Image (spheres, rainbow, N blue to C red):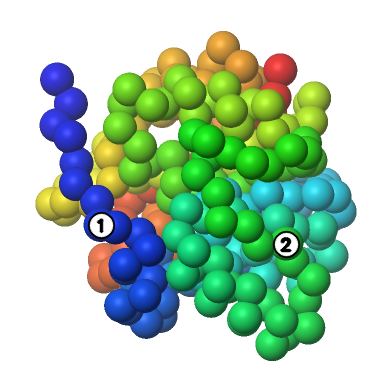
């Protein structure tokens, strides 16, 4: 039986803490995502940054020329991310949204999830897969970064093996690759992570 993990109230967190101090804060584009986009020769299109948080990934992708939507359950996070994007003169659509009651009504060329999936209780995972599948164009991509089963620190998100990722996503996505990596952020040492490239069936 998987031990249920506890998480903060995300809106309170973004109201009370500076985003630069959060464990997942990374001002640059995620290195694994950048490499995947190069390998797949993806340099344009529509993107959903799911669980955008401080908006760093949405901003980095917009600077690369993508049409970006950033969604997060935290209204405070969305407000801060939108303000930051406007400061930089970027046209990004930020929306407060609960993925399980999503108001998003378009299909994207790809979805990037850098820390949303791995906080959901196991009972919600198939709902997540079904909903995210509906947000991606046929043959479009889902990039998921999550904690690896090799991560040993206490607390934090759920951990996954490559086999579990294949089992969870395999009915609706073709698993192109899963590799061990790290979660760039403010923790030392950096948490061990998996980065998965999945293509919508």
Q: Camera-side residue: 72 or 24?
A: 72
Residue 180 can be seen, yes or no: no
Classify mark 1: residues with Cα within 10 Å, few (<14), some (14-19) or many (20+).
Answer: few
Q: Which element type, helix, strand or loop, lies under badge 2?
A: strand
Number of marks in the rendered image: 2
Disc ID at residue 84:
none
Q: Position of residue 76 (x, y in %)?
A: 46, 70
Q: Which element type, helix, strand or loop, lies under badge 1?
A: loop
Q: Camera-side residue: 151 or 93?
A: 93
Q: Residue at left 18%, top 26%? A: 2
Disc ID at residue 93:
2
Q: Camera-side residue: 150 or 110?
A: 110
Q: Camera-side residue: 150 or 57?
A: 57
Disc ID at residue 8:
1
Upstream in sequence: badge 1 or badge 2: 1
Q: Residue at left 80%, top 25%? A: 138
Asked if 33 appears above or below 178 in the picture, the reply is below
Q: Residue at left 32%, top 22%? A: 123
Classify mark 2: residues with Cα within 10 Å, few (<14), some (14-19) or many (20+).
Answer: some
Q: Position of residue 110 (x, y in %)?
A: 72, 42
Q: Position of residue 71 (x, y in %)?
A: 59, 54
Looking at the image, residue 3 sits to the left or right of residue 36; the answer is left
Q: CA distance from mark 1 to mark 2?
A: 25 Å
Which of the 4 image quadrants contains residue 159? Answer: top left
Do the CB atoms of the residues marked 1 and 2 lie less than 8 Å apart?
A: no
Q: Residue at left 14%, top 31%? A: 3
**Quarter of the picture holding the N terminus:** top left
Looking at the image, residue 81 sits to the left or right of residue 146; the answer is right
């Amino acid at each position: 039986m998987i031990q249920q993990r506890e998480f903060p109230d995300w809106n309170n967190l973004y109201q009370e803490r500076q985003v630069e101090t959060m464990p997942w804060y990374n001002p640059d584009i995620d290195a694994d995502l950048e490499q995947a986009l190069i390998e797949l020769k993806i340099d344009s299109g529509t993107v959903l940054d799911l669980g955008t948080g401080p908006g760093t990934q949405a901003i980095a992708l917009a600077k690369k020329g993508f049409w970006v939507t950033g969604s997060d359950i935290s209204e405070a996070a969305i407000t801060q991310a939108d303000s930051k994007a406007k400061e930089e003169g970027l046209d990004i659509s930020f929306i407060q949204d609960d993925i399980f009651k999503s108001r998003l009504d378009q299909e994207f060329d790809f979805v990037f999830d850098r820390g949303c999936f791995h906080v959901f209780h196991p009972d919600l995972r198939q709902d997540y897969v079904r909903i995210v599948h509906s947000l991606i164009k046929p043959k479009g991509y889902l990039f998921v970064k999550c904690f690896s089963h090799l991560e040993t620190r206490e607390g934090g998100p759920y951990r996954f093996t490559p086999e579990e990722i294949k089992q969870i996503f395999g009915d609706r996505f073709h698993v192109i690759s899963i590799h061990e990596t790290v979660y760039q952020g403010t923790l030392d040492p950096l948490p061990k992570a998996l980065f998965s490239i999945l293509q919508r069936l």
